[in-house]
Structures are given as structure tokens and as C-alpha cells.
Image: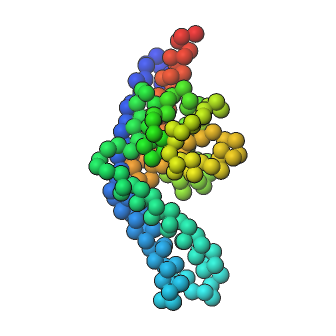
Amino acid sequence: MAGDGKEVVPVNLELLSSDNHVGAMLVCGLAMLASVVGELLGWGSFLEPSHMLAWVLRPVFWVFGSILIILVVRRLLIPGCRPLVRINFGGIHDIRMTHVPLRWSFIVGASRPPGLMKYLLRGVVLALHPDYESSGDETLWSRLFHTTCRLRGKHVLFIECGTLDCGPDETLAVIQTHLRARQEMVIKKR
């Protein structure tokens, strides 16, 4: 697009919650937790103790089921139909992760998670400038979620798109149009 002489106007996007995705996450989370709790209560399940997979699947179901339930409850506690993620000329504002919009000057790049994580984590990874300091702008959930990355020295912010009405590929495309427009503006000023 840059070589054909046409100027690309960045697209503004407001992402709402998809009730179908939230409902599917709730059902999956409840099914995982129900199988573990049912087995602990002695009701039996497909995770029979004699199978080796039972020792692996029990903790996985317990952890992922709990995470899915927590994510759904967090979404259900957000009142009304206000947008969860807003992408515009001012920056990116994910109300689940930050209290104020993240300005474009702090965003270095955007991509999908690499490898197998691309299919497991439906979202976009924002690479942040090394000088970025959250300074209380991030929510408690965001600080907990990104702790391991920050301890390893990575400056990233993950935008989860699994429960949104627009997928991660479309969200990434919109973010990249804003980043390209910003780079072209910087080049023109020089």
C-alpha cells in the first residue's frame, strides 16, 4: 500500500463484548470445574484415577476452568454496552487493562502471539517502548497478568480478543494501520 502512492487513513474501532463468546467460555469453564469437583466428591467422571491422563488433566481443568470463570465474571460485572477496547487517534484503551488510553508514542509494534500460542491465545501483543512506565495507569488485573513478562524484561501489553465481537486478525490490522500512519507522519516531518 505504501508503494502505490495512496494514503491509508487509519480506521477507528470500538470493540464490544460478544455474548456468544462469553457464553461459550462460561460453559467450557463450568464443564472443566464440574468434572474436577464431581470427581473430588466421588461422583466419578471421564477422568478415572486409573488413567495416567487424569493426573495431568485434573490440574489443567482446575486452573483453566477457574481462569475462564474469572474472565467471564469480570466481563459480566462491566455494566451496560460500553466498549471494552477503543482504538482511535488518541491510542488504544482497553478498559480491562488500563485506566487511560495507551498513547501511540509508547507502542513500538503489534503482532499475534508466535507459534502454538497464536491458536491458544486469541489476542494481540503490543510491544511497548522500553521507557514506558505504567505508573498506576494499568489495572490490577493487567499487572498480575503481565508480571512474568515484566520480570523477564519484556515490555508488552496483551489485548485479549476471545470475548470481543471482532477477532484478533481484524484488531491487529487496525492497530497496524495506525502504526504505519504514525511512522509516515514522523518520516514526513523529517
Judge from the rendering whether residue 62 lies leftward or rightward of residue 154; answer left or right.
left
Q: Nearer the viewer, residue 64 or 111?
A: 64
Judge from the rendering whether residue 150 lies leftward or rightward of residue 118; answer left or right.
right
Q: Position of residue 8 (x, y in %)?
A: 43, 23
Judge from the rendering whether residue 23 lies leftward or rightward of residue 41; answer left or right.
left
Residue shown at 53%/12% (left/top)? 188
Is residue 111 visible from the viewing direction of this image? no
Q: Position of residue 52 (x, y in %)?
A: 65, 81
Residue shown at 50%/68% (left/top)? 65
Q: Nearer the viewer, residue 117 or 86?
A: 86
Residue shown at 29%/47% (left/top)? 81
Q: Residue furthest top?
A: 190
Q: Is residue 117 above or below residue 50?
A: above
Which quarter of the rendering shows the C terminus? top right
Q: Position of residue 189 (x, y in %)?
A: 54, 10
Is residue 71 visible from the viewing direction of this image? yes
Judge from the rendering whether residue 151 lies leftward or rightward of residue 14; answer left or right.
right
Q: Is residue 125 above or below residue 44?
A: above
Q: Is residue 164 above or below residue 126?
A: below
Q: Nearer the viewer, residue 3 or 10?
A: 10
Marker count (numbered): 0
Q: Position of residue 82 (x, y in %)?
A: 32, 44
Q: Residue furthest right?
A: 152
Q: Residue furthest front?
A: 136
Q: Colour scheme in the image?
A: rainbow
Q: Residue furthest left?
A: 80
Residue shown at 54%/71% (left/top)? 61
